[in-house]
Amino acid sequence: MFRLKYDPSAIGKFIFPNVTWRSSANKILLTFDDSPNKHITERILKTLEKNNITALFFCIGRNIEQTGSLVSEISTAGHCIGNHGYTHINLRKCAINQVKDEINKTSQLIAEKTGKSPRFFRPPFGRFNREIISTAAEIGLKTILWTLITYDYKNDINLVKFTFRFIRDNAIIVLHDNIKNADIICDSINLLYEYIQKNNLQFGIPRECLK
């Protein structure tokens, strides 16, 4: 049970087999939730470039509207853009029409800003049910969860480092593009990169990790 706090995929992959919990090709996929953020995103992009990491950014529709060209900057830098809902509401508490609206509005914004329609969806807070997954699939989106949650939003670098012990060669890792972890986000990326290198693991790019 202790491990499940950090790696829900151990059980999730059996209960929800239509959800992607793990990377493929034995490579690590780094993902960010809650993008874009006018205070954090550009720092993240610079740190990823320094470490030669290509990531998947799950973007909130409302944040896209409020941050001008930032989502297009993420895309132009070579990263993948995913759908994280429009208002970051718990979709399990929503009627299905509202779920559709949350997803559709965000996909439309992403397509308008980047010229590319998103292929991947992550429900806010990682909370979902079969109906939400089916709705996303009907819209053309594959639901992506994770193998490792770092709890970086608690703004504790020692906690982030502690979670690295659960990394495996097919991990999907979650960090956040969020003001809550502003003090530690760049250090978190740098330390993660060092850990991956030290343990002879390898980062992959979204299109190869999510085949």
Image (cartoon, rainbow, N blue to C red):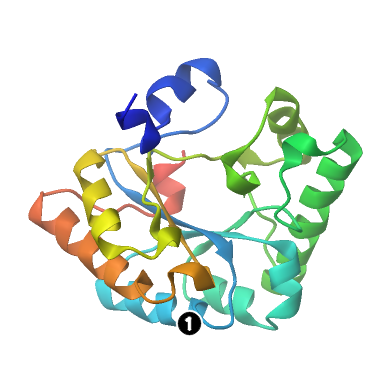
206 over 135 or under it: above or below: below
Query: Could you say which is closer to the camera, residue 183 or residue 70?
Result: 183
Give the residue at the far top of this rendering.
14
Is residue 7 found left or right of 143 in the rendered image? left
In the image, residue 207 lies at what x, y percent? 46, 49
**Place of residue 61 in the rendered image (x, y in percent of width and height, measured from the top left):** 73, 63
Q: Of 150 and 84, which appears nearest the observer?
A: 150
Residue type of the residue flagged with mark 1: Glu
**Residue 164, how many percent across, how many down?**
23, 48
State the image quarter where residue 109 is shown.
bottom right
Going 70% across and 83% down the picture, which residue do you hit? 68
Report the residue marked by disc 1: 42
Residue at the spot x=39%, y=63% of the render? Answer: 54
| 159 lies left or right of 122 | left
Residue at image position (86%, 49%) is 101
**Label 1 secondary element:** helix
The answer to whether residue 184 shows anywhere in this view is: yes
Height in image: 10 above or below 124?
above
Badge 1: how crowded within 10 Å, few (<14), some, or many (20+)? some
What x and y, as percent, mark residue 123?
64, 44
Q: Say which residue appears at 36% left-offset and 51% top-offset.
A: 150
Q: Can residue 55 be seen in this view?
A: no
Q: Number of callouts in the render?
A: 1
Q: Could you tell me which quadrant the N terminus lies in?
A: top left
In the picture as drawn, the residue positioned furthest to the right comes out as 97
Query: Is 42 on the left-hand or right-hand side of 71?
Result: left
In which quadrant of the rendered view does residue 197 lie? bottom left
